[in-house]
Amino acid sequence: MAMNRITKIKRSIFSRSSLRAIIAIIVFLVLWECGSRSKEWLGHSLPWIGLVPPPSAVVLVWMDLLGDSGYWESWYLSTMRVMSGFVAAMIIGIPLGLMMAVSRTFNSITFPTFEILRPIPPLAWVPVAIIFWPTEELSIAFVTFLGAFFTVVINVLGGAKAIDMRFYQSAQAMGSSQWDIFRRVVLPATIPSIVVGSSVGMGITWNVVVAAEMISGGGGGTSGTGGGLGFFIWNSYVGGSYEQIVVGMISIGIAGYASSELLRGIGGFFTPWLKTR
Amino acid sequence: MAIASGGAAAPVTSKLQVSAGEIIVDNVSKSYGTGIFEKKVVKGCSFTIERNKLTVMIGPSGCGKSTLIKLLAGFEKPTTGNILLNGKPVTGPGRDRLVVFQESALFPWMTTYDNIMYGPIARGEADQKARDLAEFLLDKVGLRDFRSKYPTQLSGGMQRRAELARAMINNPEVMILDEPFRGLDAMSKELMWEYYSALFEESHRTNFFVTTDIDEALFLADRLIIMSNIPTRVRATIEVNIPRPRKLADFFTSERANEVKMTALSLLHEEAMKSFSGGSKAAADFVDSYARRSEQKA
Ligand SMILES: Nc1ncnc2c1ncn2[C@@H]1O[C@H](COP(=O)(O)OP(=O)(O)OP(=O)(O)O)[C@@H](O)[C@H]1O
Ligand SMILES: [Mg+2]
């Protein structure tokens, strides 16, 4: 069993597609390195890559930062903000979307308000959030929450409304009660949309949290590098460390990718029937 | 019993025998739309789905069979006329009738076994007896090895068989099936006929089966109802009178089968021609040119 798993992992690492991905990343890094070192190409100065620090310099700065507790505090703060906002959006958004899909009355009461609020960009809420919530931390979490909330609700609602009439009719014909139909037809049929909504929502929360941290000044950060990854980038900019800016950006990329992978895993666990396609 | 099914089947078999229902369709009409938009789909239709028999309805495509089924199911109401189940008017969907709709499908998020057990669980009847019956049906439709597979992992024919088992387990007083073997290739279709008729011979409950395939109709039917073109009504009813159990091997060579088939075909042909001359211009042109060509040849 164990051997089997190891060979499986090896195989997936050395598979053709991951090999391609690794080569692509290496080519990208080499081009970037050459570009930012030479600062020109065939006698023309390169427009922006010449201003970006080369990856080797970024890696050196990054190595230093790995020992800096402030950098890790930034990771921690941003992740916590994303998670709390995201989890709150799921806990409130999924039932709300389902209720809007199931009850016509509830839908007609809530949908118009929802649709007016939905187009407002989460960042437009920042001032209101700061006034409304007692601590800066809560304000940031709230804005993050909004980022995921509308996406989750609209996906759940759309998914539940798109359920094939045939499924209701079959269920009804076999003697299913309303509650039973909800539990064993509406809910499972909506899970794929919940998964899609949550992964899109997760992407938005990372966008929002970074911007909110930049605007609000990082919240509870204790050092120059603490205060969330968004604040970390902003602070590096103010401090003139371009390498740190790039480190911050890549960190966010990694964080976003990791959370998407996590969600994919969780989503796959709840939708075993989709894996068989 | 009709088919060999091992010793354990006996108690389950008796469970399949439930009080069977009878449906009387009395002068039923159904139109959609009103005024100049009115479209008559069913017109003055009367027939009986007899108790403990397999009644097959056959009619040209688009004549209104599925519309009739929606009325029988109670999802829609007749414009005029009555539908009686065991003497009581049908007013809405009910557990006494189980309808497998033309477009019905297994639940993609459930395994074969969970799909089959859907009905018993829904009604709070998922006891040992129901589980035994599910096992029995899994065997009967040849899906024992596929019990924990999802519908997407089954072939089209397997899905139809699973649907059949999912319907059968509910022991309805009347079982109504709308073209359940649609879209299958000839080979799997014939297999399905054998599975299905074996299941029917096991239970002998009231079955109503709708199809457009004459061989399918003939092989399955105790009684054959031939429908006219749209707006549909009963064109003829034939008592098939071929003993059960039936075997595909020699069924279609029997004299009685051919006799019924010829009668049914000539009636169906007439109805199909009506739709050409009465309806589509293109179709009428096609028939005309066809007639002219055969004249020239002669
Ligand atoms: N809700 C509706 N509104 C208007 N017309 C309808 C409606 N439902 C069915 N019809 C019409 O009724 C006619 C018969 O449809 P139906 O589905 O009952 O045919 P069918 O005999 O089941 O055909 P097939 O064998 O191809 O399944 C069609 O012409 C269709 O356009
Ligand atoms: Mg039909």
Image (cartoon, helix red, strand yellow):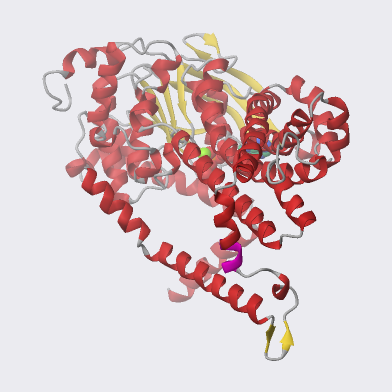
| Residue visible at 29% across and 42% down in the picture | B259
> Can the viewer see residue B228?
no
* Residue B51 screen position, x and y as percent: 37, 16
* Residue B2 screen position, x and y as percent: 17, 25
Residue A58: say if magenta. Answer: yes
Quarter of the image where the C terminus of chain B is located: bottom left
- Which residue is outermost to the bottom? A43
> In front: B93, or B239?
B93
Quarter of the rendered image showing ligand 1: top right
> Can the viewer see residue A149?
yes
* Residue A110 screen position, x and y as percent: 79, 25
Residue B232: say if magenta. Answer: no
Question: As drawn, is B3 to the left or to the right of B51?
Answer: left
The part of the chain drawn in magenta is A55-59
| Residue visible at 28% across and 36% down in the picture | B146
Please tell me in which quadrant of the rendered image residue A106 appears: top right
Question: As drawn, is B161 to the left or to the right of A119?
Answer: left
* Residue A14 screen position, x and y as percent: 35, 62
| Residue visible at 72% across and 45% down in the picture | A224
> In front: A203, or B107?
A203
